[in-house]
Image (cartoon, grey):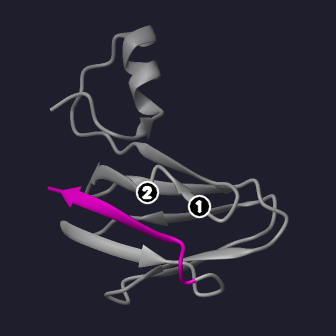
Amino acid sequence: MWPRPCVRTGVVALAIFGWASGGAAETVRIDVDKLTFIPAQVSAHVGDSVEWVNADFVAHTATARNKAWDVTIPAKGVGRVTLKRPGVIDYYCRFHPNMVGRIEVAE
């Protein structure tokens, strides 16, 4: 199902070391810059982590509309969450509600 619209850091390790894919959890990176989640839509799997890297000088949140999580992303900092269930998760920033994103989580 490649290419996926996100950065998956575990792929590099697989290519370099020849590790077999056995469902190992990976990290999906989402940049936060100029009041925008980049990319705004990503795909992931249950057990993967999502990492928001904030380049802005103000704090943000990644708040799931289904109340699954509410991650604080400090200014010039990082916020993380581990995905626990499949489904589509729409999220937004509580401080800047026009900032929105979506994560499609597969088994």
Q: Which residue is mark 2?
A: 40
Residue 27 is situated, as x and y percent measured from the top left of the image, at: 46, 45
Query: Which image quadrant for residue 58?
Result: bottom right
Looking at the rendered structure, the secondary structure element under dot 1 is loop
Residue 99 is situated, as x and y percent measured from the top left of the image, at: 54, 72
**What's the residue type where badge 1 is placed?**
Thr
Residue 101 drawn in magenta? yes
Q: Is residue 91 above or below residue 57?
A: below
**What's the residue type where badge 2 is placed?**
Ala
Q: Which residue is mark 1?
A: 36
Contact between labelled residues 2 and 1, with CB atoms less than 8 Å apart = yes
Residue lying at 45% horizontally and 37% vertically, measured from the top left: 7
Q: Is residue 91 above or below residue 1?
A: below
Q: Is residue 29 above or below residue 64?
A: above
Residue 85 shows in the view: no
From this viewpoint, which residue is outermost toward the right? 57
Front residue of this view, candidates 26 and 39: 39
Bounds of the magenta segment:
97-107
Residue 100 is situated, as x and y percent measured from the top left of the image, at: 46, 71
